[in-house]
Image (tube, rainbow, N blue to C red):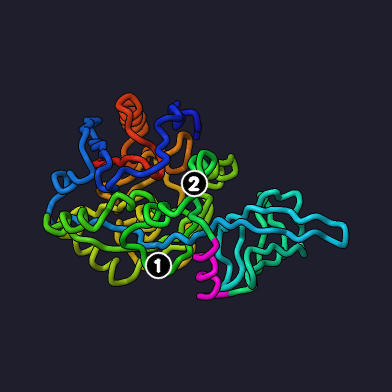
Amino acid sequence: MNLAAFDFDLPENLIALRPADPQDSARLLVVHGDGRLEDAAVRDLPRYLSAGDVLVFNDTRVLPAALKGIRPGRGETGTDVACDVNLVERIDSNTWRALARPGKRLKPGDTIRFADGFHALLTQRIDGGEIELSFSLSGAALEQALDAHGAMPLPPYIARRRPADARDRDTYQTSFAGEDAASVAAPTAGLHFTPRLLSELDAAGLRRETVRLHVGLGTFKPLEAAQLEANRLHAEWRRLTPETAGRLNAARAAGHRCVPVGTTAMRTLESCTTPAGTLVPATGPTDIFLKPGDAVRTTDALVTNFHLPASSLFMLVCALMGTDVMQAAYAHAIASDYRFYSYGDACLLLP
């Protein structure tokens, strides 16, 4: 697999630093399987879908996982070190994997203090530059502390240009997020779906279901040769319940389309699909990696944002639509000043 086939040049000014206001006013590029392109708006979705089609949302909740802390000086003459910590993956009720800066100034046994009564012990270093932190709080108490002292974990292409602020608490969280806060990145296609848009979709006879996939920072990491060779990505926890699987199977059997909202919802469904195209319930990790040539069995259409060049997510949309079609669609989007990435505009892909 040649990654160069999935590359493209994106002007930096097209990387959205804030969402559209209101968020359901974003643009929508409709991409048909034969290559036809239509410029529309997200609120035009009911025009392109039919009553009985099922939109499948990822209802994971984003944790305010970006923390600022202090590593106290070692010994009597040591100096305190300011640290930036980004949580990556929850291990148990008080243990997380994380990224930290300055990593070279931290070692196992160090304590990082975030606030009075809220600190973490660095227990080990992990391959890939990550560390493991054991927090002084656990469960709901830890979530409350993170909510009080953390910031939204904006993607690197936004965070390097502006800090997260109070507005991101609302705009980087879907309106339908559940209670389990364990994601460190948002399922960003869902950010367009305001209560107003959801009501309009309901009025058009479209149905809604939810799955859950806790999104990790691996979403933003460049693809590595080992991942291509192994045909596997970073693992993320996902859940498809028996009830949801049954309703989706029945809808598709009746001729209606299954339309994931976002690549995380699509990866959840495709990881729970038999070779015959039947959805089966599952709970646990998935490292599914969809790319051109792989079978896409239960995704009949997809709502998604615009993705990074040479990324696993751009390869996923090429698996659904074809690489030539998606390269042409992205070239049109760039020429037409569509806004890209997490806070950007959307695509509706209709194979």
Q: Is residue 58 above or below residue 158?
A: below
Determine crowd level at label 1: few under 14, some 14-19, many 20+ residues with C-alpha closer than 10 A: some
Q: Is residue 328 above or below residue 348?
A: above
At which x and y percent is residue 96? 60, 64
Residue under numbered circle 1: 282
For the stretch drawn in magenta, what is the main secondary structure? helix
* Tag 2 near tag 1, CB within 8 Å: no
Q: Residue furthest right?
A: 76
Q: Residue at x 27, y 42 (%)?
A: 26
Q: Quadrant of residue 270?
A: bottom left
Q: Quadrant of residue 181?
A: bottom left
Going by the image, does 36 lie left or right of 14?
left
At which x and y percent is residue 2? 50, 31
- Three-letter amino acid code at the position of disc 2: Pro
Stretch in magenta: 138-149
Q: Nearer the viewer, residue 300 or 81?
A: 81
The span from disc 2 to disc 1 (Cα, nearest Å) is: 28 Å
Q: Residue at x 54, y 75 (%)?
A: 141
At which x and y percent is residue 316? 40, 43
Determine crowd level at label 2: few under 14, some 14-19, many 20+ residues with C-alpha closer than 10 A: some
- Three-letter amino acid code at the position of disc 1: Ala
Q: Nearer the viewer, residue 295 or 177?
A: 177
Q: Nearer the viewer, residue 351 or 54?
A: 54
At which x and y percent is residue 279? 31, 62
Question: Where does the C terminus fall, quadrant-wise?
Answer: top left
Residue under numbered circle 2: 155
Can residue 8 be seen here? The reply is: no
